[in-house]
Image (cartoon, grey):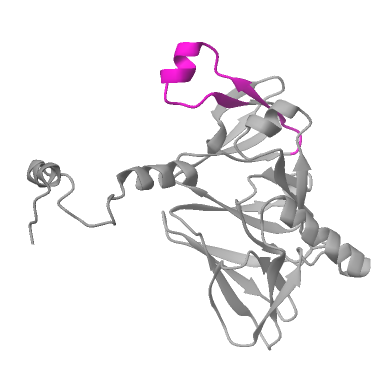
């Protein structure tokens, strides 16, 4: 193992968090803001990039940080190291309702391609880079931009997604069409492209977007039932207007008062 070998335990169902168990001198890396709690003697440190380019010197660190900027993430990540005696624990929580999925990269040929905001935490040594899509259509219309995130190594990584997670194994030549926002992750051997839904009427009035992802096996893909962008758009659409004052949304009387400009204080 080139990566630190960590143990873990998942808690919860739809509002999950993962507890990582660290032996002395073991380290886990995580996105800034993902920490939930940690034991004493856990040393927290902010680093450029993912911390896997230490032997590359300053240029290696700057390159790692630059990759994260391109994917739209922060320049920095946080490392958590057990500097005490005995086993210690540190926990990370998903930022929105959904599932946390543990990924053993040693069982995935050392590479996983995922949404740029899906990564939560990983064993130290896992490299977090960028994955350029070979086809221009996938980049401009894929819903995640031209670049997706790439996790490489032989250790454990944890990604999160909204709603329920579905794992689908595709046989050689088997094709699956997915809403672009619902694609969470895929193994590196999946052929990925984005296609137009077809038909002006369907595109204009179908309500499912103009493009979908086409995934061709062999390989494994992970699909989420509730993308955060979809959840956010529904919340925004339902948010009260006019300064956010609550005037009885959902009731006919409230709507009548809104229409007439009445004051129900």
- Check the image and report above or below for 15 versus 110: below
In the visual, does 109 lie left or right of 101? right
Q: Nearer the viewer, residue 232 or 84?
A: 232
The answer to whether residue 227 is seen in the rendering is no
**Does the magenta segment cover residue 8?**
no
Residue 128: x and y in percent read 75, 55
**Does the magenta segment cover residue 195?**
yes
The answer to whether residue 60 is seen in the rendering is yes
- Check the image and report above or below for 45 versus 257: below
Residue stretch in magenta: 188-213
In the visual, does 127 lie left or right of 180? right
Residue 73: x and y in percent read 66, 57
In the visual, does 114 lie left or right of 25? left
Q: Residue at x 70, y 33 (%)?
A: 139
Q: Residue at x 72, y 42 (%)?
A: 147
Outermost residue toward the front in this view: 261
Residue 165: x and y in percent read 50, 43
Q: Within the image, what quadrant is residue 45 found in?
A: bottom right
Q: Residue at x 71, y 38 (%)?
A: 146
Where is the N terminus found, in terms of image quarters?
A: bottom right
Residue 104: x and y in percent read 69, 53
Q: How many numbered callouts?
A: 0
Q: Within the image, what quadrant is residue 164 found in?
A: top left
In the visual, does 20 lie left or right of 237? right
Where is the C terminus found, in terms of image quarters?
A: bottom left
């Amino acid at each position: 193992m080139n990566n630190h070998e960590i143990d873990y335990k998942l808690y919860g169902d739809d509002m999950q968090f993962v507890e990582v168990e660290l032996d002395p001198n073991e380290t886990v890396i995580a996105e800034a803001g993902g920490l939930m709690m940690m034991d004493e003697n856990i040393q927290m440190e902010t680093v450029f990039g993912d911390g896997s380019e230490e032997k590359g010197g300053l240029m290696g660190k700057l390159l790692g940080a630059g990759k994260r900027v391109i994917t739209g993430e922060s320049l920095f990540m946080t490392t958590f190291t057990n500097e005490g005696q005995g086993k210690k624990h540190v926990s990370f929580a998903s930022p929105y309702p959904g599932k946390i999925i543990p990924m053993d990269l040693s069982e995935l040929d050392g590479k996983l391609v995922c949404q740029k905001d899906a990564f939560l935490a990983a064993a130290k040594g896992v490299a977090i880079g960028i994955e350029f899509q070979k086809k221009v259509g996938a980049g401009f219309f894929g819903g995640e931009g031209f670049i997706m995130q790439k996790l490489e190594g032989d250790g454990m990584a944890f990604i999160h997604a909204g709603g329920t997670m579905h794992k689908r194994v595709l046989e050689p030549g088997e094709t699956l069409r997915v809403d672009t926002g619902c694609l969470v992750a895929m193994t590196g051997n999946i052929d990925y492209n984005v296609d137009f839904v077809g038909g002006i009427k369907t595109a204009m009035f179908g309500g499912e977007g103009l493009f979908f992802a086409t995934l061709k096996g062999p390989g494994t893909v992970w699909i989420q039932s509730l993308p955060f962008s979809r959840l956010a758009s529904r919340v925004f659409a339902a948010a009260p207007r006019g300064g956010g004052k609550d005037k009885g949304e959902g009731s006919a009387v409230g709507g009548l008062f809104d229409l007439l400009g009445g004051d129900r204080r």
